[in-house]
Image (spheres, rainbow, N blue to C red):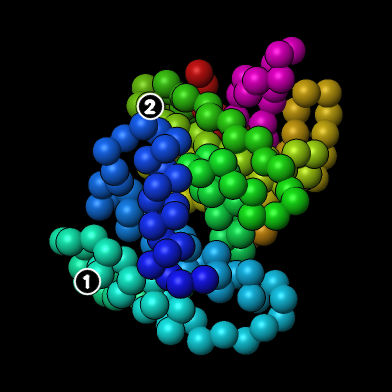
Amino acid sequence: MDRKKEINEYYQNYVSRYGSNGMTHEELEPLIVNLAYLEIMKQRKKGVFVNEFMIFTEYTVAAEELFAGLNNLISMWIAFQVTLDWDGLWDFLRGYFQSKFGESIDDVQIVEEIFNSSSHKRYENEVFISNSNVERIVKIMFSEDKKECLFGISPTLSEKKAYLKIVKNNTYTYIGSDPDYKFIITFDFLDSIDHVTLILDSRNIRIEYFE
């Protein structure tokens, strides 16, 4: 598909979906970058070699021609290239396109949960260190069967891909693709998140997040 046409279709979808006058530059930039990611990742899943820089450039140039004042996107290439190797990228794209545009990029349905934490306690070597009344936003995108998730804590922890290890009653334990990370999530009787624990094994750190 023509890159300009594709970008414009998503732009119009957004306007229709949210009843807005348009997308701000802060909303346009992730759209352009994520469209390039999606194109590249789809080809990778097919085992097709593509010129990643060319695809990135096609989208950024098309966007800059469509929208006045949107420029220098090409400067994002290095960060873009690094993120291509992130094992949670497809999961992130799945959530982005589903939540922003109501579009499924594959047959996997996701469930997004937001846990607003008002305080957290920190332990090191199982010894209580501190209590902090600082707000944190825990965002988790589960696969429909909860066997996988993308786990992030704003603003302190970028999204980590994780896989279900143990289920005990209403408590689910996930091990990150980086096994240093462990996430323990407890649900209440309404299947909403009641409590979250982050464990960093290599540093013997445990952080308990409370509503």
* Mark seen at residue 135: 2
Q: In the image, what residue type sits under mark 2?
A: Glu
Location of mark 1 (residue): 72
- The rendered magenta stretch, by its main secondary structure, is classed as strand
Q: Would residue 27 appear left or right of 52 to someone viewing this image? A: left
Residue 205 visible to an observer of this rendering:
no
**Magenta span includes 96:** no
Rendered location of residue 59, percent (x, y) = 39, 71
Give the distance between the C-alpha atoms of the residues marked 2 and 1, in whole angstroms: 34 Å
Residue type of the residue flagged with mark 1: Asn
Circle 2 crowding by C-alpha within 10 Å: few under 14, some 14–19, many from 20: some
Residue 187 lies, in percent from the top left, at: 70, 22
Is residue 94 depicted above or below 130 in this figure? below
Taking the spot 80% from the left edge, 39% from the top edge, the residue there is 145
Residue 185: percent from left, percent from top: 67, 31
Magenta range = 183-196
Quadrant housing residue 32: bottom left
Q: Nearer the viewer, residue 167 or 13?
A: 13
Q: Position of residue 70 (x, y in %)?
A: 21, 62
Is 195 magenta? The answer is yes
